[in-house]
Image (spheres, helix red, strand yellow):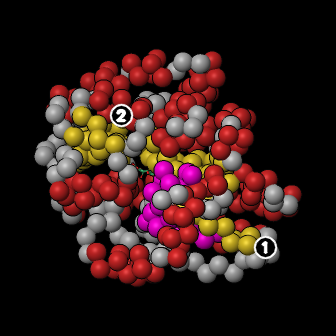
Amino acid sequence: MSPKTLAASVVAGLSALALAACSAGTGPATGAGNGGGSTQAAAAEKTLRLSLNQTEQHPSYVALKHFGERLAKATNGRLGIQVYPNETLGAQAEALQLVGDGSVDLAIVSGSQLEKLNQDFSVFNLPLVFDSVESQMKVVNNLDVVGDLYTSLESSNQITVVGGFTQGTRSVYTSKGPVNTPADLKGQKIRVQDSPLAIAMVEAMGASATPMAFGEVYTALQSGVIDGAENNEVSYVTQKHLEVAKFYSRTNHLVGLDYLIINSPLLNGLSAEDRAAFDKEWAATFAEHTQLWAAETDKAVKTAEAAGAKFNEVDADAFRKALEPLTAQYLKTEGQKALYDAAQSASK
Ligand code: GCU
């Protein structure tokens, strides 16, 4: 299906999807009670459609919903945002195309998606590149550092990157038992995001990488197609992966990064006043998201433990040693090295 057809059919079929979500019973919370699609009243003259692959319980949904509300207020109702959670407008790979062709206005996509369009994005997806959420946020929302990178897809793909949301620290979780060393991952099929670096990372940690879309992971874990996955505590809980992979081993291999992307002609067509409001409210949005992130991570761990999940520390040195060679392998150009250095100096 072409991206345009896909967009038209998913939007037309939202209520059908919501009904299906209501009767699904298992898998991630779909927000069935409020339709699985958008939930906020959109009173704006122009309502931008934003694609998200998370549930309504996820901090990204909450912060983006508030973004829309504040934007509508700041522009006296000229501009609003309607968030479509739960992959209702497609998985991230589709969302990327739909934003490029203007069928969807905005999307949250993981760094591994943008790597496919410009390999410089892979710098921020390197394991060990950021040592904390705080240092990551200093870099990825500082346009002096990332301004050129964020406009680099405008002429080729009509996509502008607005800024970054943290994904927190990602770790491996499995159904079979705790992981302590890379040797424990030998022979285990671990789901990864679909990018060469994501695959290389999990293979360096000793596992066999299985790329697949986020929304397919629950069923794949449940049916035993994969033995585990890797993600942060919040997604582990909101996607209900804890039900089917109870051992969360703190490999802490990556402080992951999501981006807000927007169709470039749309962004560049905003009046100066609306653009200023958009930028200002986005700054408030990623700040709110970062705060929510810390609180929701703590909450997710408690929820998971109460539901029987087991968290364990790992041999951190062994994983670090396994991952270190990737830095040199993926930092090839001067531009990539400069981005890497900026990330490193912000951590100090
Ligand atoms: C995180 C991230 C998503 C990403 C997902 C994944 O939840 O926030 O943007 O899609 O990981 O592993 O696919």
Q: Is mark 1 within 8 Å of ligand 1?
A: no
The amino acid type, in three-letter code, at marker 2 is Ile
- Residue that carries the numbered disc 1 in the rendered image: 78
Question: Disc 1, disc 2: CB below 8 Å?
Answer: no
> Viewer-nearest of labels 1 and 2?
2
Q: Is residue 29 visible?
A: yes
Considering every residue shown, the one lying at the far right of the view is: 272
Disc ID at residue 133: none
Image location of residue 327, percent across then percent down: 45, 22
90 within the magenta span = yes
The amino acid type, in three-letter code, at marker 1 is Arg
Query: Regarding mark 2 in the picture, which secondary structure is present there?
Result: helix
Observer-nearest residue: 34 or 116? 116
Query: Regarding mark 1 in the picture, which secondary structure is present there?
Result: loop
Image location of residue 253, percent across then percent down: 36, 35
258 up-or-down from 86: above or below: above
Observer-nearest residue: 195 or 33? 195
For label 2, count other residues whose C-alpha is less than 10 Å away and answer few (under 14), some (14-19) or many (20+).
Answer: some
Q: CA distance from mark 1 to mark 2?
A: 43 Å
Q: Which residues are magenta?
A: 81-97
Residue at position x 49%, y 47% in the image: 110
Residue at position x 72%, y 41% in the image: 155
Considering every residue shown, the one lying at the far left of the view is: 176
Residue at position x 78%, y 61% in the image: 277
290 within the magenta span = no
- Residue that carries the numbered disc 2 in the rendered image: 199
